[in-house]
Image (spheres, rainbow, N blue to C red):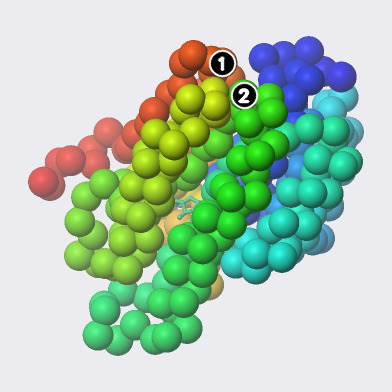
Amino acid sequence: MDSGPLSETAVLVTGASSGIGAATVRKLARDGADVALVARREDRLTELADEIAAEHAVDTHVVPADVSDPAQVTAAVESTVDTLGSLDGVVVNAGVGRGSDVETLSDEQYRAMMNVNVNGAFYTARESLPHLREGAGSLVFVGSFAGQYPRPFNPVYAATKWWLRGFAHSLAGQVGDDDIGITVVNPSEVRSEFNSEDGTAFNERFELGEVTEPEEVADAIAFAMQQEPPTTINSIDVFRRDKFSHF
Ligand code: NAP
């Protein structure tokens, strides 16, 4: 096993096939954690797991799954515990943005956001909690700037992230006594593949240096993951420096 702040731990990351999730898997493995990679695109997960196995002495577990399907989430969590031996951390990161104006938002776009950002987060948390309780583990949610401030450009996306933040902080009240740490990491724009199914991906829309990189959010997630009882990091805002310039 790699030595490092997270050695001897097993962490499951949803949305591990690109962007923030992939960067988080790399960072956690560098910190010594065994990692379970969850997303729908198995080829991407396998490629990333192979890269990690070549660079770090940690175990990897590839779990192709759709987080909007509760049965697949249950199976993903169970197979992770069976394969890696425990579940000490979970990063609820899978998320999508679709459309813009409420009046023209299709049922499909609406459901895509609700199914992944809200339902998927709930299923992942619900299935993980019994295992996290066993080892005083951590649950890190990837929220958004859009979950803290109104977003005229996309009210439904914003609402899914407001839900996530409300859920996370309320859940902290419910399971804090069990020594489970809950964190919400709120990034502003990140140069990932976000928006790629709906237009121009953020890593094409923004130049290098213009907004936050996925690796910077991954560092924040890993920092939260390293906390031990009685402490947790309640929330981390990772904003680009000029985010409030036009407020
Ligand atoms: P990304 O590169 O598009 O990654 C999204 C990830 O979510 C992919 O790995 C995708 O994998 C996964 N995913 C989507 N639907 C899924 C489903 N049904 N089941 C399982 N996995 C699913 O975008 P990202 O920026 O890294 O997004 C990660 C998180 O950051 C999201 O929650 C997003 O809302 C949040 N965020 C992003 C930004 C930004 O500007 N980029 C800002 C604030 C917050 P598959 O397609 O392989 O399933």
- Name the residue that disc number 2 marks: 136
- Determine the residue positioned at 47% across, 16% down: 231
Image position of 214 (left or right of 10): left
Amino acid type of the residue that numbered disc 2 sits on in the rendered structure: Ala
Q: Which quarter is ligand 1 in?
A: bottom right
> Residue 23 lies in what quarter of the image?
top right
The location of residue 11, given as percent across then percent down, is 70, 35
> Height in image: 42 above or below 139?
below
Residue 158 drawn at (x, y percent):
31, 60
Secondary structure at numbered mark 1: loop
Q: Is there CB contact under 8 Å for labels 1 and 2?
A: yes
Q: Which mark is residue 236?
A: none
Q: Which residue is pictured at 37% across the width and 41% down the height?
A: 170
Horizontally, is 56 left or right of 198 in the view?
Answer: right
Residue 9 visible? The answer is: yes
Q: Which residue is mark 1?
A: 228
Say if 184 sits above or below 154 in the image: above
Q: Is mark 2 within 8 Å of ligand 1?
A: no
Q: Residue furthest left?
A: 247
Crowd tier of the residue under label 1, counting other residues whose Cα lies within 10 Å: few below 14, some 14–19, many 20 or above: some
Q: Nearer the viewer, residue 87 or 149?
A: 87
Q: Is residue 212 visible?
A: no
Classify mark 2: helix, strand or loop. loop
Cα–Cα gap, marks 1 and 2: 8 Å
As rendered, which of 8 and 85 lies closer to the eye? 85
Residue at image point 20% right, 65% down: 152
Upstream in the sequence, badge 1 or badge 2? 2
Image position of 99 with respect to 188: above or below: below
- For the image, the number of numbered tags is 2
